Image: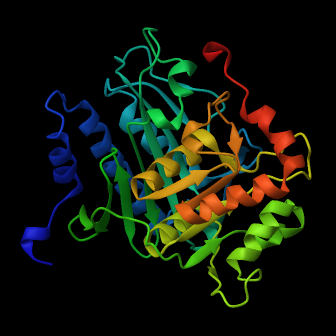
């Protein structure tokens, strides 16, 4: 690599800031601190088996999932990197039931940070790729300190989103609405270096990602759509390859670079829970924003995930994200075949938070 191409993530973020003459550097500092947090987490994921960070803790999160030791470590790192900077008015993490308030002894700022500290943590003990997801909103309410109203904003209002993949190499991908950029961690230098500039979904998709173990629970529209991906509806067409890791970040990352779609649908096995598994505020919004900036699209099967109005912090949504043509085909299959599911899901989707009603 020539010296002209050695662009660190810190330098890149600062160069992006120049497009905004009114910028104060506060937002830039947040992104740079997320990169630093990623270095800390990457260091520990690479030596987790040697540092007593493998395995489950004795606590569970709000979803009833046993928290992994590395989950808690990553959560604490991101909190420590942001709680005393004066940049954020509130934070929210997948690992916490409620908002994470900024301690009263510290100033608050104009930004909200949401994050999934360690996505795919069930794969930690078997050495499979895992990741961190984050997104940033601007303060919305007029309250002195951050409120739930500041957090529960539509994805269309996002200022930035990103993720980190901890795998054969550590890579951080982010967007501020001006394209998607990827940076690979050079362990020797201790720096994230620009390795993927202006990432776009390839026009020709290669893969689809879905857990076939759940096929018995799929709605007719989802079954029909997966058959089209497999080429079963048109024997002359070439099927897509099936790749499913079970770490959302890793599956999304591969599909964005190679072309494809990630699917986690809703179902009717529990009629009162037709909304699937993906967390709107901590996973779906961020990846939907990144997908849009990379020329892709994310839907809950009804419409754009970025248009979904949040009504609770730990709200779940079905998720179809990847090449736009594939996601729109999924929506068409659901409209045609899944009237029962739509009747169950739409009331939940259209619920609004009390302060936005």
298 vs 163, left or right, is right
Q: Nearer the viewer, residue 197 or 249?
A: 197
Q: Residue at x 45, y 22 (%)?
A: 102
10 vs 274, left or right, is left
Q: Nearer the viewer, residue 67 or 299?
A: 299
Q: Residue at x 81, y 71 (%)?
A: 213
In this rendering, the answer to whether 265 lies above or below 170 is: above
283 vs 335, left or right, is left
In this rendering, the answer to whether 23 lies above or below 134 is: above
Is residue 264 visible in the rendered image? The answer is: no
Image quarter for residue 41? bottom left
Q: Quadrant of the C terminus?
A: top right
- x, y (%) of residue 222? 78, 63
Q: Residue at x 14, y 40 (%)?
A: 18
Q: Residue at x 62, y 13 (%)?
A: 355
Image quarter for residue 168? bottom left
- x, y (%) of residue 330? 69, 61
- x, y (%) of residue 248? 59, 61
328 vs 341, left or right, is left
Is residue 251 visible in the rendered image? The answer is: yes
Q: Quadrant of the N terminus?
A: bottom left
In this rendering, the answer to whether 163 lies above or below 14 is: below
Image quarter for residue 238? bottom right
- x, y (%) of residue 258? 47, 75
Q: Nearer the viewer, residue 265 or 205?
A: 205
Q: Nearer the viewer, residue 347 or 48?
A: 347
């Amino acid at each position: 690599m020539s010296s002209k191409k050695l662009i660190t993530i810190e330098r890149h973020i600062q160069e992006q800031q120049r497009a905004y003459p009114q910028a104060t550097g506060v937002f830039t500092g947040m992104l740079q601190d997320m990169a630093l947090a990623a270095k800390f987490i990457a260091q520990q994921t690479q030596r987790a088996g040697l540092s007593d960070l493998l395995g489950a803790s004795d606590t569970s999160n709000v979803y009833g999932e046993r928290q992994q030791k590395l989950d808690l470590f990553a959560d604490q790192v991101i909190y420590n990197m942001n709680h005393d900077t004066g940049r954020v008015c509130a934070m929210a993490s997948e690992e916490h039931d409620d908002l994470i308030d900024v301690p009263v002894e510290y100033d608050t700022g104009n930004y909200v940070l949401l994050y999934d500290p360690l996505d795919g943590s069930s794969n930690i003990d078997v050495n499979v790729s895992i990741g961190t997801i984050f997104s940033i909103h601007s303060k919305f309410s007029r309250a002195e300190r951050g409120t739930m109203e500041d957090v529960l904003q539509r994805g269309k209002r996002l200022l930035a989103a990103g993720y980190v993949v901890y795998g054969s190499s550590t890579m951080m991908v982010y967007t501020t609405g001006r394209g998607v950029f990827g940076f690979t961690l050079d362990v020797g230098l201790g720096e994230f270096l620009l390795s993927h500039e202006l990432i776009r979904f390839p026009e020709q998709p290669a893969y689809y990602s879905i857990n076939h173990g759940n096929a018995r629970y799929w709605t007719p529209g989802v079954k029909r759509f997966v058959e089209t991906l497999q080429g079963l509806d048109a024997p002359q067409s070439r099927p897509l390859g099936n790749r499913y890791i079970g770490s959302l970040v890793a599956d999304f990352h591969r599909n964005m670079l190679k072309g494809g779609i990630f699917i986690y649908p809703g179902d009717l096995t529990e009629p009162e829970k037709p909304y699937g598994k993906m967390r709107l505020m901590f996973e779906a919004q961020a990846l939907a924003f990144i997908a849009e900036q990379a020329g892709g699209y994310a839907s809950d099967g009804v419409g754009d995930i970025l248009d979904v109005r949040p009504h609770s912090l730990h709200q779940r949504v079905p998720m179809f994200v990847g090449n736009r043509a594939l996601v729109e085909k999924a929506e068409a299959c659901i409209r045609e075949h899944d009237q029962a599911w739509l009747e169950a899901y739409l009331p939940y989707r259209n619920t609004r938070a009390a302060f936005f009603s």
